[in-house]
Image (spheres, grey):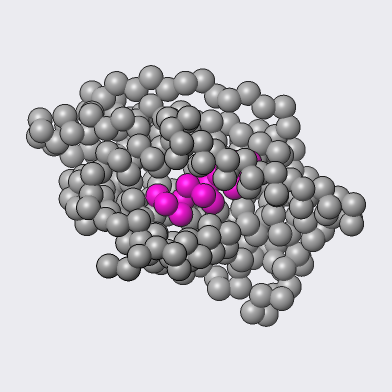
Amino acid sequence: MSQGIRIGSPEHKELFCRVFIDTHDPYDPQKIDWPDIDAATREQLAALPFWNEAVSTESDVANKVQALAPLERDPLIRDAIALQGYEEGRHAALLRIMTSHYGINVAARGPEPFKDAEWAFIRTGYGECFDSFFSFGLFRIAQDAGFFPASLIKFFEPIVQEEARHILFFVNWMAWRRLNHALLQRVRDVGQTCTAMAMQIWARIQTIRGVQTDDFMLNSRDSMNVDITPRGFLELCLQENERRLSGYDARLLRPRFVPTVARLALKFLPKG
């Protein structure tokens, strides 16, 4: 039970789908009037190392989400997943249009092949739960430090907030799906969840070790070169995560794993 609604019930499904659909922002990247920026700002943007990975990741996620929508039998959930697929594709389009407008070369890789659309969606959803938590903090740092001009920051705000909506929808979809499966299928669901989360943790470990170098979050953090302690960064991520999710119906589940790990890590990090 979550504050008056039973998780896994038809009411729960109606709520998490309707909240997602009703909070959609219908902006069109093709109609954005990009502001003029000076040469120094343009060079600073072009020097950032993550554009290729950002466009590639958003395109790949869109491909996976869009593949699941026609396979979903429930019409309301199908509509919500299709909308998420559209929004993910719109993220990639906005980045392509913006980089093209400012003459930033992008060499995005092709989409990652997959055979099982549902498993690809689950892996992607847990990946977004990890990445969004840190991207919320990074975006706030970029705003406060004036790293991007305010005239550009406002165009990225919808992308960041949409990621909050995506992970909110995902964790509620996972819970609803699991509770509406038979017992044996629930065991398989738990196995999928553990596997997907373990893969995300392993990918971050590889990034920390330097084995994997195309991590968008790592490149973003290093490029900003902002003086903030690990403790300060985690505290900021927790604050921004709470702020971005607080505007949605309190009866819905929130992503818990990454915030819980972050709070645990704070117990061992020095203060000050």
Residue 16 coordinates in the image, percent (x, y): 62, 61
Residue 169 coordinates in the image, percent (x, y): 59, 56
Q: Is residue 81 left or right of residue 225?
A: right
Compared with residue 77, is residue 2 higher up or lower down, i.e. above or below? Answer: below
Quadrant showing the C terminus: bottom left
The stretch of residues the image draws in magenta is: 123-135
Give residue 121's quadrant in the image: top right
Q: Is residue 240 visible to the viewer in this orientation of the structure?
A: no
User: Residue at horizontal 10%, vertical 30%?
Assistant: 39
Give residue 168's quadrant in the image: bottom right
Residue 69 coordinates in the image, percent (x, y): 67, 40
Q: Is residue 75 left or right of residue 56?
A: right
Quadrant showing the N terminus: bottom right
Residue 127 coordinates in the image, percent (x, y): 55, 44
User: Residue at horizontal 54%, vertical 38%?
Assistant: 203
Q: Is residue 253 magenta?
A: no
Q: Main secondary structure of the magenta part?
A: helix
User: Residue at horizontal 34%, vertical 30%?
Assistant: 51
Between 245 and 199, the residue placed more toward the observer is 199
Between 180 and 192, the residue placed more toward the observer is 192
